[in-house]
Amino acid sequence: MRLGIDTGGTFTDFVFLGEGVGRVHKVASTPGNPLQAILQGVGELCPEGLDDTAVIHGTTVGTNAFLTRRGARVVLVTTQGFEDVLFIGRQTRRQLFDLAPSRPPELLPRERVVGVAERLRADGSVLASLTSEEIARVVKEVTALNPEAVAVCLLHSYVKAEHEEKLEKALGSLKVPVSLSSRVLPEFREFERTSATVVNAYLGPVLARYLENWRRELPDTPLFIQQSSGGFLPARLAAARSWISTRWARVGGPLPIGTGAELCGWAPKAPGPTPARCATAGGARSPSPTPNFTWVASCPTVFWGDACPSRSRPRTGP
């Protein structure tokens, strides 16, 4: 049995699928504590409890923290000479020819970027070694900045992660989450990889606290978190991959709508997901794997209609 839970700003929606049973429910959201509305809805929809039921949950906790800049206090550790990559960005921007464009608040200020004297070549060979003295200096500087999370993004670490892993081990003494670009997004292009790693570190503690509260209230219920790719992850992995849950709402509705349209013969077969691409949200840009939606001509809401297109037409709405 499965229970789908979609937390929105106004309503929290529930869809329960059991053996020959399907039920839907809706309650008012509680933005200050999203879990409150979830517990209310679960109690009303499934008074018998959630035994043998897996929950697939789309949550805006990370998205809201990202947009309102209420994430963790992050320190970025990167190769010397590349400290400004995150702030320079790319040429693509909203006001390309504006001589005085306005910039949204950054996820972290330039003062919380620590350069590391090390360098790998594009093939992974070492150009400048990472010494134990340099590691000690970096740990000291990061500690002084009092971080709640650390993002580590070294040049060409997607080829060889050894230097990042050494720093992770040393930074473990701080007892805060450490995000490595070689795990978050092991691909070339420094701005995209740095952005994704910083966003992951920024949102990780927020999502981890939310999931901890969930485990405390529903400790025996298997929980999966909706991702921007259209799939979902076990909750125990979601906090470590928080960056790919920020845009789940963009796919959580259109995917079932498109699938229903395809099954009813109203749409061509849906193409598969596209590779990670850079998306803008709240002024910060980071790549995220999202499906191609050119085949969906509908809003992300409930899909209605009979299986036979000759008897009805697709309709969206509550």
Image: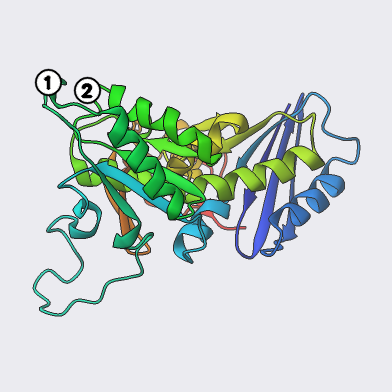
In the image, residue 237 lies at what x, y percent?
55, 30
Name which residue type carries label 2.
Val
Q: Is residue 261 left or right of residue 163?
A: right
* Residue beneath the point at 38% across and 43% down: 151
List x then y, in percent, for residue 289.
34, 38
Q: Is residue 143 left or right of residue 187?
A: right
Q: Residues within 10 Å of mark 2 (few under 14, many from 20)?
A: some
What residue appears at the point 15 percent right and 47 percent down from the top-left corner? 81
Asked if one can make out residue 249 in the rendered structure from this viewpoint, the answer is: no
Colouring: rainbow
Answer whether labels 1 and 2 touch (C-beta < 8 Å).
yes
* Picture coordinates of residue 4, whole percent (x, y): 66, 39
264 sits to left or right of 61 = left
Quadrant of the drawing holding the N terminus: top right
Report the front residue among 74 and 257: 74
What residue is shown with label 1? Answer: 123
Q: Amino acid at mark 1?
A: Asp
User: Which badge, 1 or 2, is on the more N-terminal residue?
Assistant: 1
Tag 1's secondary structure? loop
| Coordinates of residue 222 in the picture (x, y in percent) | 71, 28
What's the CA distance linking mark 1 and mark 2? 7 Å
The answer, for residue 52, to whether it is visible in the render is yes
* Mark 2, secondary structure of its residue: loop
Q: Residue furthest right?
A: 48
The answer to whether 92 is drawn above or below residue 235 in the figure is: below
Q: Which residue is mark 2?
A: 159
Q: Residue at x 36, y 36 (%)?
A: 136
Q: Residue at x 24, y 29 (%)?
A: 130
